[in-house]
Image (tube, coloured by chain):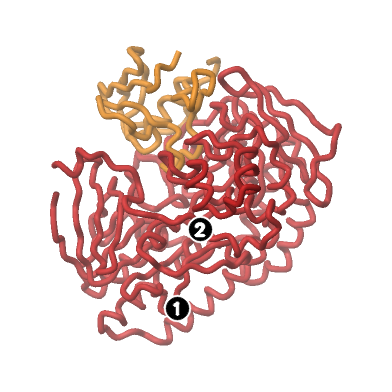
Chain colours: A orange, B red
Amino acid sequence: MNRDLRIPGIIRGPEIHVTVNGRKITAFQGETLLAALTAAGMKTLGIGQSHDDTRGAVCGMGVCYQCLMTIDGQLDQRACMTVVHDGMTIETQGDLP
Amino acid sequence: MTLGIKCDTAIVGAGCAGVVAAHILADHGLDILVMDETPHTGGQSLRSLPWPQNPSIFTGLNRPGIRRLPGRIKTAPVPIMHRTQVIGIDGHLEILAEKNGKEIICITPQAVLLATGARETFVPFPGWTLPGVISTGAAQILMKGSGILPADNMVAAGLGPFLTAVSAEYLSNRGRLLSIADFGKMQGKLGMLTHGFHQFSKLLEGTRYLAKILGSKVPFHHQTMVLEATGTKELERVVLARVDNQGKIIAGTGKIYTTGCLAIGWGFAPNLELPLQAGCAILHDPELGGWVTAVNDAFESSIPGIFCAGEITGIAGASKSIIEGELAARGILEKLGREVDENRMAVLQRQRKHVLAFGAYFNRLHRVPDTVFCAIPDTVTICRCENITMGDIKTAVKKGYDTPALLKKALRCGMGFCQGRTCGPVINRILAAVTNRPAGDIPMLPVRMPVKPVSVRSFLQ
């Protein structure tokens, strides 16, 4: 990651933190989890049928279900349809390497 | 479980059509309930940043009728039930919905308006399951809805005006666009001019996007498509290749781009799951974008009391949705015994005719030829949820499984989490192409309740 993907000049909500697989990342209240993960450079969110078959978000609008994650203990939640909150804990599913 | 919430009209979808209808019905004193799956109001075309301190960045809205809309959305007539997904409707207009991911509610309205919008469609290619391959819609939502670039640099590919719009937006936000691969011809864009009279503002919008791209000096390739995407675990390289007039890839024209992001989009397919599950009749018309719900002049479907408006009656964009939202609202008022202004209806019907003509032109121009679907290599994944390949489908078709429902029984395609939302429109086109039948002869995959996956926990609350 050599460039901040957050578009400059935008007034954002309060800076918060979420934890993804034990790693703390910065987010801004109001943005979606998919946006926060994208800004943190995290593209691989799950797997298909094998460890080599890595998957990431596709549609970004709740249609494709390729961004399913365990969010605050709840299985199979769509990262693109979830708005972050401070202290949110996220885990990838399917034993991602 | 909350049972028996009564109201005059339940509206599913708080996009352009749903919000406009809500305003009109509320103005007439009706008790309405609006549900939307997302946390925001405005649907896919009216996304904005969640932080109100920023100036509105609604794009593509300098069209009559739409210009006023964002303001009206900010003052929605009733609180919209966000994060609420409708999972089924039965013949007596009883609606089951999941609210906030943890509670089931049951609504019994006098009339229902389905305004469920559309989603993007794709032409699958080798490597399209790699993380980093996203839809053009996802790229736009990240920018418009969260103020984040999808990536530091990317390639954009596909077909249709939305590809141009997203490419221009990415450039405006100082993204490094490496190349645009448009399957269409440059002549197609010029043909828009003949439709410019009634749709002048749309034309202007398209020209502005084109100017942005041409001014940026980013290579803008026409008659070009993605040959393959490669990378270990994540996207690393994209190969673009030229196609001939029949849409066939010309050997030896491949050009490699090194990037971690590829945005793809080949147009839109209406979200027909709810109308299909409810039993509404559908019709096939390539000028409307393929399969759509059949409605009468009052926008009532074949099921009495279920009205449909917006992209699910034909793909033509936000202007049509706004007009139809108002027409459907007036249809509902008439159904519920209220008086309707016939003159206003006539004006709206006239406006609708113009946007439909423009839409038909675009849908004709951006119809992906059968040859493209026939040419998908056997190893390419078609159903992403269940990992069903093009080869699997072709083998099953040879054995006689030649409809979406039969293929689902034979292969499980369409049985995963997305329930065929991504592969469904693609499989319909593949079936038509490889069996040499018209697309209208391939039925839609049947839809059953729940139309979205819901947790058992929600039913137990």
Residues at discs 2 and 1 in contact (Cβ within 8 Å): no
The mark lying in front, picked from 2 and 1, is: 2
Assign a secondary structure to mark 2.
loop
Q: Residue at x 67, y 65 (%)?
A: B361
Chain letter, disc 2 residue: B
Assign a secondary structure to mark 1.
loop
Q: Residue at x 66, y 63 (%)?
A: B438
Q: Is residue B72 visible?
A: yes
Q: Which mark is residue B107?
A: none
Q: Quadrant of residue A29?
A: top left
Relative depth, front residue between B278 and A59: B278
Instruction: Specify the amino acid type for callout 1.
Output: Asn
Q: Which mark is residue B296?
A: 1
- In-image side of A64 versus B122 (left or right): left
Residue bearing the label numbered 2: B444
Residue B76: image x %, image y %?
Answer: 29, 58
